DNA sequence: CTTGACCTTGTCACCGGCGTCAAGCTTTAC
DNA sequence: GTAAAGCTTGACGCCGGTGACAAGGTCAAG
């Protein structure tokens, strides 16, 4: 199939697909007229990329998952490199949550300090 | 004082100070040779900006705090506009925390799905 | 033949908060 | 005198993932 069909089937822009190719995440054959040509396995790969990105993975994070799928494994997350990314990502998210909680209490403290009573009495200026 | 001294006293780069001025957050008089000239109230203002940024506020978020200080109030967070920013920011942080928690569980679920057992047995591939 | 859908490469723009040159002036210290 | 700081404006780069052009080539339907 060509780029437009792949884009429609996965629900992604053609611009995104060309970008993924430029970054080396997907590949394409070229037909005689220069058009990119894809097959079913590419649908699977791009779907995997989008799933990962939808939960906050970057394109680089997705690379080992793509490699895993290409090497014939049924799941992109079963190779050790993918597992390492999962673990790193979970740790990253945990750290971000901790940071946000800390920032939240700092903001609340500054707020209480600058305007005592405002946190409780919502209507006051 | 000149820009270098202000920068040293607050612990910020001269580049940052010029940027704040460009964005309209701080002002400066110019001496005969064209150098920027600041006074003590600017130390307070820039300190306030940095405190806010250190807990995740953007420069725009800091603007009402600066205005509040300039209007003579002892605390930058006591004017209604600042209070509104505090409330908006707390809500924003809360939303981000909720999003992260949701993403965390999605990632954990994908992980468990792709490689059952990996979450528990840390040494396994 | 023409229109229109689809494809190609290439480039600029975005967002925030600066870092980091560049090229030149002023002032200070020795 | 001269070298080292310190000051000025201006402009590019970064980071990620595209959106939105521009200026064309290709192909099927009417
Ligand atoms: Zn694998
Ligand atoms: Zn109040
Ligand atoms: Zn005020
Ligand atoms: Zn495993």
Image (spheres, coloured by chain):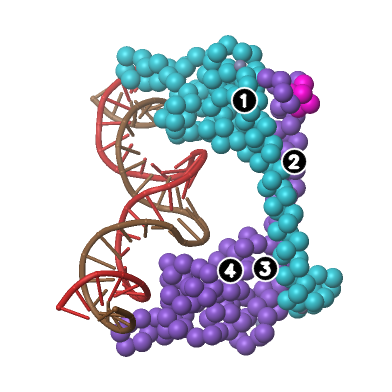
Chain colours: A cyan, B purple, C brown, D red
x then y, percent, for residue B92: 69, 57
Q: Is residue A33 above or below residue B30?
A: above
Vertical side of B99 occupied by B94: above or below: below
Using the rendered view, name the quadrant where residue B15 is placed. Answer: bottom left
- Residue A65 in percent (x, y) is at 58, 23
- Span highlighted in magenta in the image: B117-121
Ligand 1 within 8 Å of disc 1? The answer is: yes
Location of the N terminus of chain B (image quadrant)? bottom left
Mark 2 or 3, nearer chain start: 3
Mark 4 vs mark 3, CA separation in Å = 16 Å
Residue under label 3: B85
Question: What is the chain letter for disc 3?
Answer: B
Q: Chain of mark 2?
A: B
Quadrant in the rendering for residue A46: top right
Q: Main secondary structure of the magenta part?
A: loop
Q: Are marks 2 and 3 on the same chain?
A: yes
Label 2 beta carbon within 8 A of ligand 4: no
Q: CA distance from mark 4 to mark 1?
A: 39 Å
Marks 1 and 2 belong to one chain:
no
Residue B115 pos. (x, y %): 71, 20
Any mark on residue A124, and which?
A: none
Residue B3 appears in the picture as rendered: yes
Closer to viewer: mark 1 or mark 3: 1
Q: Quadrant of ligand 2?
A: bottom right
Front residue of this view, candidates A14 and B5: B5
- Of callouts 4 and 3, the N-terminal one: 4
Is A18 drawn above or below residue A31 in the view shown?
below
Mark 4 on the same chain as mark 1: no
Return the residue at label 2: B102
């Amino acid at each position: 199939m060509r780029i437009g069909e792949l884009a429609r089937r996965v629900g992604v822009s053609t611009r995104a697909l060309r970008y993924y190719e430029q970054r080396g995440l997907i590949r394409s054959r070229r037909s005689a007229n220069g058009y990119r040509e894809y097959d079913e396995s590419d649908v699977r790969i791009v779907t995997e990329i989008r799933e990962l990105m939808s939960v906050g993975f970057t394109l680089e994070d997705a690379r080992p998952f793509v490699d895993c799928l290409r090497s014939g494994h049924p799941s992109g997350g079963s190779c050790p490199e993918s597992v390492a990314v999962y673990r790193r990502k979970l740790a990253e998210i945990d750290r971000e949550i901790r940071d946000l909680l800390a920032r939240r209490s700092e903001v609340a403290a500054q707020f209480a300090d600058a305007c005592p009573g405002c946190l409780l009495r919502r209507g006051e200026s």
